[in-house]
Amino acid sequence: MGRGLLIVFEGCDRSGKTTQSTRLVQALNDAGVRARLVKFPDRTTAIGAMIDAYLRQKTQLSDQAVHLLFSANRWEAMAQMRADLESGTTLVVDRYTFSGVAFSAAKRMDLKWCKAPDVGLAAPDRVFFLDIHPDDAAKRAGYGDEIYEKREMQIEVRVKFFSLMDKSWSIVDALRDPDEIHRQIMALTNRALERHNADPTPIGKLWT
Ligand code: 2DT
């Protein structure tokens, strides 16, 4: 049995990442593919609790400190993620290093500095970017009270996401019917699984 794939969902707030990543895991499991959902930030850990307090504006942290906490929150999950991948479980990840870099870079932090703490994390096999303009996303339910849920920030984040894309990314139009989006993502995932089974590659390392 080969390794599982690392599939990442990225996008601005309200783009449907949580809905689509959950549906993908369900559909893969239904098709007999072992898959598990991973979500960053993972607010359930001690580090995640600090991130949660920052996002909900209950505590203040410097931009650098919170950036490093987001990265540490991925590193604390890495051993289990690698073990799952190696044992054949496909991981579907709701936000990953690209959110880390895009949100911090949108605050005018240096791009190279932002990438550095995530160097060496497991690299995704596929990234699905659920693309929606922040103004359309805001119409869905309006933004909440968290620190980054502001129009100007979201617009800047989207620009940063585009600057991070490479050939492993697929841009998915997130303004469409959720069933249609799911079918497209399922087709892209099946193609990635078939390609990997025909020509297996080891887990890559990020930002190297
Ligand atoms: P959720 O609404 O998806 O819980 O995200 N963020 C996320 C960062 O700034 N850096 C990161 O590394 C990650 C993973 C995006 C909460 C907010 O946290 C931002 C939105």
Image (cartoon, rainbow, N blue to C red):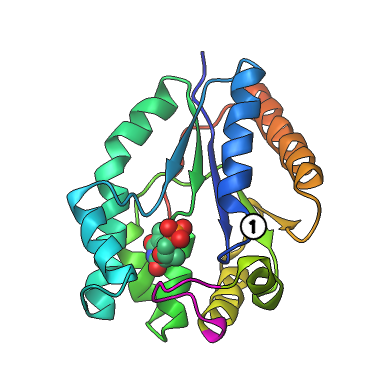
- Residue at (59, 72) in percent of width and height: 142
Task: Say left or right for 139 vs 68.
Answer: right
Pick the front one: 122 or 58: 58
- Residue at (80, 56) in percent of width and height: 176
Residue 199: image x %, image y %?
A: 64, 27
Q: Main SS of the magenta segment?
A: loop
Q: Which residue is mark 1?
A: 129
User: Quarter of the image holding residue 197?
Assistant: top right
Can residue 45 be seen from the camera position used here? yes
- Residue at (24, 45) in percent of width and height: 76
User: Quarter of the image holding residue 157?
Assistant: bottom right
Mark 1 residue type = Phe
Q: Magenta stretch: give its range.
A: 143-152
- Image vertical order of residue 33 relative to residue 104, above or below: above
Residue 9: image x %, image y %?
A: 57, 50
29 magenta-colored: no
- Residue at (63, 60) in percent of width and height: 15
Residue 188: image x %, image y %?
A: 73, 39
> Which secondary structure lies at badge 1?
strand
Task: Say left or right for 69 vs 173.
Answer: left
Label 1 CA crowd tier, 10 Å (few <14, some 14–19, many 20+): many
146 magenta-colored: yes
